[in-house]
Amino acid sequence: MDNIDVIRRLEEAYGKQDYATVDELLSDDFVAHTPGSEMMPPGREGAKAADMGAHQSFADKKTEILDIFGDGDKVVVHVRMTGTNTGGLPWANIPANGNKVDVDWIQISRHDADGRVVETWAQMDTTKLMMQLGAMPGM
């Protein structure tokens, strides 16, 4: 399986909350460099906790890979997420309010020789997300 397929499988596993597959695809020493990762446990447990939190906040959460490409041990993916705020975002003091969100992010992943994800770097349009949730005024 090539690294692009690993990221496709990983995104699918997150969508299904299939954390056994997430464990299989992330390396034992996985490190996330993403907004909010400092608030999560380290390693795979943090990645799974972040996804569980997203599903709790947005029970109808859906993601879609808009673009993906890779070279060597790196893969770049552009992902779109939609959902409805039915669970609130406790970490941001945002209550459940029924607001719809449509936001995207870019992630770079680095893979080991077996294809497992060792490290990720991501940037999300958090300003757009906060505006859609009513936590920031619109432009």
Image (cartoon, grey):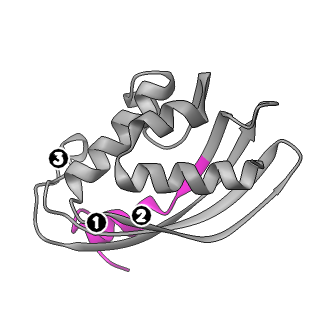
Label 2 element class = helix
Above or below: residue 123 compared with residue 60? above
User: Could you tell me which residue is drawn at 39 percent across and 56 percent down?
Assistant: 15
Locate residue 44, reporting x and y percent.
48, 27
Q: Which residues are magenta?
A: 122-139
From the viewer's perspective, tell me whether residue 73 is left or right of residue 10: right
Contact, mark 2 vs mark 1 (Cβ under 8 Å) = yes
- Vertical comparison of 9 with 33: above or below: below
Q: CA distance from mark 2 to mark 1?
A: 8 Å
Q: Are marks 3 and 1 in contact (CB under 8 Å)?
A: no
Q: CA distance from mark 3 to mark 1?
A: 12 Å
Query: Which badge, 2 or 1, comes first in the chain's sequence?
Result: 2
Say which element carries label 3. Answer: loop
Q: Would you say residue 124 sits in the magenta stretch?
A: yes
How far is disc 3 from disc 2 in space, using C-alphas?
15 Å
Nearer the observer, 36 or 58: 58
Q: Is residue 11 above or below residue 23?
A: below
Residue located at (78% from left, 49% from top): 2
Disc 3 + disc 2, Cβ < 8 Å? no
- Please state which of residues 11 and 122 is positioned toward the viewer in this rendering: 11
Residue 33 sits in quarter: top right
Q: Which residue is mark 3?
A: 93
Horizontal side, residue 19 vs residue 29: left or right: left
The image shows a total of numbered marks equal to: 3
The residue indicated by pointer 2 is 127
Can you say which quadrant of the picture contains the C terminus? bottom left
Q: In the image, which is nearer the foreground, mark 3 or mark 1? A: 3
Residue 9 rendering spot, x and y as whole percentages = 57, 52
Task: Please state which of residues 7 and 49 is positioned toward the viewer in this rendering.
Answer: 7
Residue at which label 1 appears: 136
